[in-house]
Amino acid sequence: MEIFLQQIINGLVQGSVYALVALGYTMVYGILGLINFAHGEVVMVGAMLALSALTAMIGWGLSPLLALPLSLILAMAGCMLLGYGIERIAYRPLRHAPRLAPLITAIGVSIVLQNLAMMIWGREYHAFPQLIANQSHHIAGAIINDIQIIIIIMALVIMLALMAVVHRTRLGRAMRAVAENQHAAQLMGVDVNRVISVTFMLGSALAAIAGLMVSANYGLAHYYMGFLLGLKAFTAAVLGGIGNLRGAMLGGLLLGLIESLGAGYIGDLTGGFMGSQYQDVFAFFVLIAVLVFRPSGLLGERLAERA
Amino acid sequence: MRLPTLFCLTALALVACGKSATDQVAASGEMVVRIGAVAPLTGPQAHLGKDNENGTRMAIDDANAKGVTLGGRRVHFELISEDDQADPKTATIVAQKLMDNKVAGVIGHLNSGTTIPAAKIYSDNGIPQISPSATAVSYTHQGFKGAFRVMANDEQQGHVLGAYSVKNLGAKRIAIIDDRTAYGQGLADEFIKAARAAGAEIVAHEYTSDKAVDFTAVLTAVKGKQPDLLFYGGMDAQGGPMARQIKALALNVKLVMGDGAHTPEFVKLAGDAAEGAYASLPGVPLDKMPGGKAFSDRFVAKYQPIQSYAPYCYDAVNVMIAAMQKADSAEPAKYLPALAGISHQGVTANIQFDAMGDLKGGFVTMYQVHQGKWQALETLGAAQ
C-alpha cells in the first residue's frame, strides 16, 4: 500500500513539473496559435541563470534564504528578456507567413539556445547546491520532501494566477481579443505587438520558475535538460487540450501519474513480459488514445480554425 | 524529435567538407596521416566525450612533437574529432564521414551502443578501430579483423562485479536497473549471470534510459521487492541523480555500478548520497598504472581532471602509432597485422590483443566513494 501511495506521490511531483512547463506552451499557443518549441530551452536557460546567480551570491557571502529569491528574480528577468528577444527576432517577422515557417524557426531557436548554453556553461552537468535543508516527510509510509511539496503547490498557484490574469485583468482581455482575431483587436485599439510580447515574457518568466524548481528537485542542471522536458511538457499540454490552462495542469498531472504507475506496475501486471522500459510507450499510447477520441485534448475546445 | 540532430549534422558536414579540401595542400614535405576519433561531444555524456578527445589529442600532439617517420618520410598526425551524440544512428553517419575523409585509423567510439554499428563500416573499408572504452562483449565478436579495445570487456567486468557483490558485500536479494543501451544491458546481463552463480537471488529488473533524470517510479517499484543491493548498468549522468533519489526514498541498499559511473561527475551529481557507492573500472588504479602518475599530472596541467577513459584513449593512439612504426606504413592493410600482434607498454597496461581483438589479461578494480572520492578497494584478475 505504501508503495502504491509512493508511486502516486512520484507521479504528482513529476506531473507538476510537466504542468509548470506545459503552462508556458499552452499560454503562447492559446494567444498565438504557435507552438513555441524553444520553450524547453528557455526553461534550461532559466535554470542555468538561477544556478549561476546563486553560486555567485553564495560566493559573496549572502545568506541562502536571501540568495534564492534574488536569483529567481534575476533568472526570471533574464528569461523575460530572452522571451522578448525570441519573439522579436524569430517569430514577429513570420507572423503572417504560413504556419510551418514559425515552427521551423522555433526549432532553430531551440538549437541555437542549446549550443549557446553549451558554450557559456560548458558540457558538464552542474550540481545544484543543497542550500536549504530539504526535510523529508513521512505520510503513511510514503516519503515526500519540501521541494516536492513546493513544486506541487507552485504549479497549482501559477495556474490559478494565470487564469486570473487572463480572465480578470485588462491585459487578459486584450490577450483574449488577440487570440480571437488579431485584426479586429487592432482596429479596436489593442496594441497587438505589445500584447504578444507580454505573453511571451510571461511565459518565459514561468519557464524560469520551472527551471529553478526542476533543477532543485533533481539536484542538477545542464544545457541539455530542456529538450526532453520540453517534449514531455508539450505532450502534456496536448493531452490536456493545448491552449487551455486547466488542461495543461490536468495533462501534466495525468502524464506524470501514467508514467510512474506504468513504470511501477507494468512489469508485475504482465508477469515480466513488459517491463519499465515501456514507460514512455505507455504514456504516448494514452496520448494517442485520447487524441483519437478527443482530437482537441481532454479539456480543449473545438476550434475549427485552429490546427 | 530527431530534427534538431539532423540540422546540426548537416551544418557540421558542410563545415568539415570545406576543411578537408584545404588540408591536402597544407602538407609541406610532411606526410599527413589522419586519425579519426569519435565520442559524444554533445548531449548528456559530453563531459566523458571531451575527456576522450583530450586523451586522444594529447597522444597525437606527443607523437607530432616527438616526430615519427614512416617509409622515410616525416609524418604529421592530424586528429579528426567527430561527435556521435552517444546515438547509434548518428554513429554510423559520422563513421561514414571519417571514411570519406580517408582516415588511417579510428579511436572510438566511447559507448558500446555506438561502437558496435560503426565497426561494420570501418571493417568494410578495412580501417582498424581501437575503442578505448566500449566494453560490450559483442563489439569484438562480430567477426571483424580490425576491431580492438584496450579495456577489459563486460564479460570480465560483469563477472567481477557479480561475484564481488555476493561474496564480499554479502548481497542475497539483488535488484537490477539498466539503461537499455548495449553497454548497460550487456553489463547487467553478465552481472546477473555471475550473481546467480554465486548464489544470490535477482528480485527485480527495472529499466530506464540514458537520458532520464527521474527514477523515482522504478526505484519505488524496486523498494517494494526489498532488495539489499542495487546494481545499476549505465552512465554517471543517470547514476548520480539515481543515488540521490535512492537516499530521498529511504531505499536501504548498497549501490553497485560499472565503469560508466566511476567518474568525479558521479560524486558531484550525487552529492552526499554518493558516499559508500561502489563501482568497478577495468584496469588497475591510475596511480598503480605503469605511467599513470606522470600521465595524470601532464593531463591535468593541460586540460582538466581526468573523468575516466582519457588514459585509455592515450594508449589506444600510441598502440596504433606503434603498429604503424612496426609496419613502417600508415596503410591500413599493412599495419593491421602489426597491430594484431603488437606488444606495447602503455600508460594503462602492457597492451597485447587476443585473437578476438580483446585486451589480454585485463584486470578489474573495485572502487568505493569515501569522503567524496573514489578509493580503490581491490584489484581482481578477470577470469579467462
Image: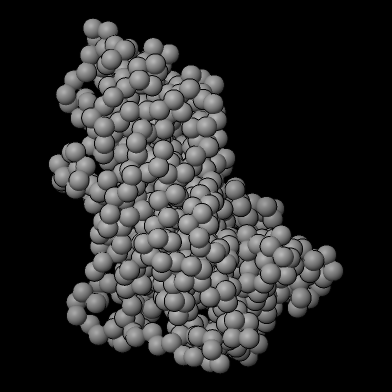
Where residue A29 appears, x then y in whole percent? 65, 69
Where B171 sits versus B186, above or below? below
Where residue A260 appears, x then y in whole percent? 62, 73
Where residue B172 appears, x then y in whole percent? 48, 67
* Residue B31 appears anywhere in the view: no
Q: Quadrant of the C terminus of chain A?
A: bottom right
Q: Is residue B94 left or right of residue A15?
A: left
Rendered image quadrant of residue A230 = bottom right
Rendered image quadrant of residue B204 = bottom right
**Residue at position x 55%, y 63% from top?**
B202
Judging depth in this view, the residue of B237 and B339 nearest the camera is: B339
**Residue at position x 42%, y 55% from top?**
B163
Rendered image quadrant of residue A82 = bottom left
**Residue at position x 38%, y 79% from top?**
A73
Q: Quadrant of the N terminus of chain A?
A: bottom right
Looking at the image, which residue sits at the far right?
A293
Where residue B330 appears, x then y in whole percent? 34, 15
**Residue at position x 17%, y 26% from top?**
B65
* Residue A134 appears anywhere in the view: yes
Which scheme is used to colour this image of the protein?
Answer: one colour
Judging depth in this view, the residue of B137 and A260 nearest the camera is: B137
Looking at the image, which residue sits at the far top?
B72
Q: Is residue B293 left or right of residue B268?
A: left
* Label total for image: 0
Judging depth in this view, the residue of A53 and B267 nearest the camera is: B267
